[in-house]
Image: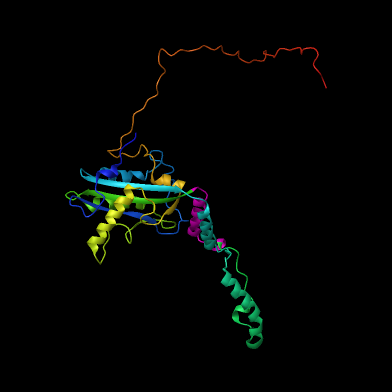
Amino acid sequence: TEVSDYTTAVPHKFPNAEWDLFGTDFVFTQPDAYPIRTWEEFEHKGQKNEPFKDPLAAMLENLARIGPGEQIWFQILIRPIGQEWRKAAEKVVKKLIGAKVPEHKSVMDTAFDLSGKVAGPIIDQFFGPSESAKPKKDEPLSKMLYMSPGERITVELIEKKMAKIGFSAKIRVVYIARKEVFKKQRGAPAIIGAIKQFNTNDANSLKPEFKHVGPSSLWLFKDLRNSWRKTKLARAYSRRSMWVGAKLQIFNIEELATMWHFPTEAVHAPLIMRTDARRGVPPSGLPVTSVAKPAARSATNVMPTVTPPEGLPFA
C-alpha cells in the first residue's frame, strides 16, 4: 500500500516554537571488514519453544511506547557497490594472520631504493656493514598456529562477511516531537539502545556519531550550532541523502537483513498489525474442460510395434 511521506508533516528548520528534534547517524567502531552480530547469533539452538529471538522486538516495542505528538524515524539507505571493499578486507585478514602484504611503492620510493643500492656498498667499504644489511632470521609465513581461539573466530567472521555481497549504507535515527511532550530519553536513545544488541566485542559495533552529526554538548555558540545540526539532519533524512552526515559504512546482505526484516510471529508489539489471509477457492461458475486421464503403466503395457513406411533411405 502506497503511503504519503511521513517526514513532510513536521518542520525541517530549527529552532522551532512548537517542535524539537534529537537524532544522529551511526558509524562502525572498527573498519568495515569487521561484521556486526547477525541473525544466526540470535538463534536459541536446542529450544523448540523459542528458536529465534527477533532483534526487531526491542526496536518495535520502543516505537510503540511513544504517544500523540511524538515521532521516531529509523532510516537505512543502501547503495550497491563493487568488489573493491573486499580488497581492503583481505588486507585486514592478512594483517591479523601475519601474512606478508606486498607494498605499493611510489616513484619517489623507487628512486630512493635505487640510490641506496648504489651508495650502500660504497658506504659499507668505509664504515663496515650496518645493522640493516645483516641477514635476518626467516619469519613464519603465518601466525595462525599461534593465534588464540578468539582471534581465529574474528578472522572467520571477517571472511564470512567477505563471502556475501556488500552495500554502502547509512543508518539514521530521528526523534521529533512537540515541545510539551518532548522527552529525549524516550526517543532516539531508546533506539540507540536497541541497536546495541548488534554489537560484538570480538568484531564490530555501531555507535552514534555526535562529534559532527546530531545535537551535542558543544562549547562555542552551543544553541546556534545545535539548531543548525538539527535542521541539517531533518532535511537530510527527508531527502534520503546518503552524502550528508557521517561517512557511509559497508554492510553485507546478511547484516542488512538482520537489522530490518518482516517481524516474526514472536514479536508482540501492540501496534504491529498483520493482514489476515486465507486460501481462496475457485468461483463456482468457472468453466472447466475435462481431460482424459492417461492409462496407468503396468507390466502389460507395451508400446506397439510400428512398421516404418517403405522407401526410407537406410545407412
What is the residue that sits farthest to the bottom in this orientation?
126
Provide residue 313's location: percent of width, then percent of height. 81, 18
Q: Does the segment drawn in magenta span residue 153?
A: yes
- Nearest the viewer among 82 and 128 is 82
Residue drawn at x 66%, y 81% is 121
> Residue 43: in sight, yes or no?
no
Relative to the observer, which residue lies in front, 206 or 98? 206
Query: Where are the magenta residues, as a range?
Result: 144-165
Residue at (30% x, 54% y) in the render: 232
Q: Is residue 311 above or below residue 84?
A: above
Decide which of 252, 96 is in the foreground and name it.
Answer: 252
- Quadrant where the N terminus is found in the figure: top left
The C terminus lies in quadrant: top right
Describe residue 242's horizontal placement relative to residue 307 as left or right: left
Q: Position of residue 286 (x, y in %)?
A: 43, 14
User: Could you tell me what secondary structure mostly forms the magenta stretch?
Assistant: helix
Query: Residue at position x 20%, y 52% from top?
Result: 16
